[in-house]
Amino acid sequence: MAMMQPAIRQRRSQTTDPPAPSSSSYSKLDKASKSDGKDEGLNWALPFVALCLLRYMSATSNIIHDCDEVFNYWEPLHFLLYKTGFQTWEYSSQFALRSYLYLLFHEIVARPALWLFGDEKVRVFYAVRFFLGFLSVVTETVLVVAVSRKYGKRLASYTLAMLCLASGCFFASTSFLPSSFSMYAISLASGLFLLDKHAAAVAVSAIGVILGWPFSILAFLPVTLYSLYIKFKPAFIAGAVTSVILLALSVVTDYYYYGKWTSSVLNLLIYNVAGGGESHLYGTEGPLFYLKNGFNNFNFCFVLAMLFLAILPIAKRKYAPDLLIVISPLYIWLGFMSLQAHKEERFLYPIYPLICLAASAVIESFPDLFRDKYDSFDTSITVKVAKFLRPVVLSIILYSSHARTFSLIHGYSAPIETYKLLEHHDDVANGSVLCVGSEWHRYPSSFFVPDFVGQVRWIDDGFGGLLPFQFNSTLGGTAAAPPYFNNKNKASEEQYLHDIDACTFLVELQLKRPYLTRGSDLSTWEAIAALPYLDRELSPALYRSFFIPYLWQEKNVFGLYKLFRRITK
């Protein structure tokens, strides 16, 4: 018996009991903690290559969605490069609301492109767009990889698919707007936050606010405040140093271009907040505008994103607090912007990647809604159906997104394509005049106007607001404070060309309306280009919003976007 005792003890020491089942649902976090190695998530190459392909497509096919993009960013950049271009009242040194530092950041690419392509201004335009697309690729790749390492490859893959194909992201990613720049910064800051690089996340947030769009500070607050809570000293130093450097650069740059000591960042905040800025002069919308707009650009993805908070109690163990902090700006920003009278689609750009991430988290959590919380390995029929629904719902969202993107590109690309055709009609004398009436707000920028066109002039078609003027070098160029500018959107008599006979070319949109246009006078004008343009007012909402094969062409009504040349007599 004494000889057997050690053997008996040895056998008992090797016996282990199976672990008790967890009281909470099994998650990727559990899997990562139980594995011997660290979960590396998705490889960097996959999201980078996928996003590169889609952002290349966006850069080459994206339309210009907002005249503010043209006149407040493309035109001043054109002036910096070519010494011609339109100026808005915001760039008058009297008001100085726009940052030249933001423009200089893009001139880093535009200037070498000018040296490379010379007079081919259209190529310079697309070089800047490729640069914007590249910024989107890099920042969104960091976000996707960070999500994969923190929450698993499935959630990251869903997010990647939506970032690639969601119409909102497709168009916003290559738009030359501060709100798009803030979108890049939010993607990067969120990714760095999930990678536990809190100081870098705060620094990027400062860049997004100061170099991009100052009002987006509200969207950066959750990540910034929580990063300060986790690692106060390094995060505070990173944010403070970045902010001081950028603000100093902004002030010095504004002094150089506006010719006086001023801060465009401060001026913009004063005008819109402390000064009671009259943004309502440029259009107001109802409280549901952003909800409708969100569905148009993201379809069911937007609906699911709104439900993220509803599934949080069930998926709390997986997503709180980090993912909740990253996604929370979606609700904060949407609520804040909906309270403002003046609403525009571009104002939501900063939170577009968060919409994709929130919707992906909801889809990934479908099985958790039906799984028994005491049984992590529940394989009931409802759980199986929920798992099956994940790719089905994702496919519906992606197909609807593609249909939306396809409809917008093919329905509204005529302005850019029409202006491109100008370069093929250089047989006229240098110094010719291109006239634009009611289509001024679809003017795609001076990058599409060849050098033989000496002037682009507006003609009066009934618009009662203030239009941009050419930068006036005689008055001081960027440092000028022209007397014809005002911040009340009051039209100036000088903004129109009253002698229509001086026009060499004319751009018009001809729709099926019971009135004649200038181009209808065939004894004066000959059409040298005509491209179809979707008539929004006469086309059914469903068919104009989403491309449905065969029905899109059949159900929608189209006008013609025309370029005319004066007939010589």
Image (cartoon, rainbow, N blue to C red):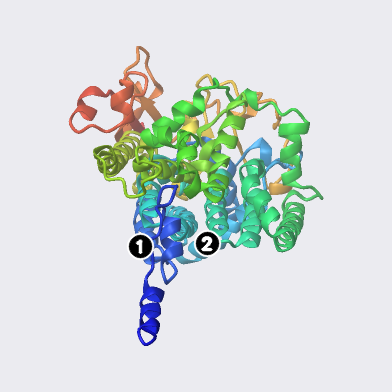
Q: Which secondary structure, mark 2?
A: helix
Residue that sits furthest to the top in the current view: 514
Q: Position of residue 475 (x, y in %)?
A: 73, 44
* Residue hosting label 1: 46
Between 60 and 396, which is closer to the camera in this rendering? 396
Of labels 2 and 1, the one closer to you = 1
Task: Choose the circle earlier in sequence order: 2 or 1.
Answer: 1
In whole angstroms, how far apart are the C-alphas of marks 2 and 1?
A: 26 Å
Between 136 and 444, which is closer to the camera in this rendering? 136
Taking 153 as reference, is 458 left or right? right
Taking 146 as reference, is 268 left or right? right
Q: Position of residue 106 (x, y in %)?
A: 56, 56
Residue that sits furthest to the left in the current view: 550
Between 30 and 434, which is closer to the camera in this rendering? 30
Q: Are marks 2 and 1 in contact (CB under 8 Å)?
A: no
Q: Which secondary structure, mark 1?
A: helix
Q: Is residue 564 visible?
A: no
Q: Position of residue 352 (x, y in %)?
A: 48, 42
Q: Which residue occupies 36% across, 38% down? A: 413
* Residue hosting label 2: 109
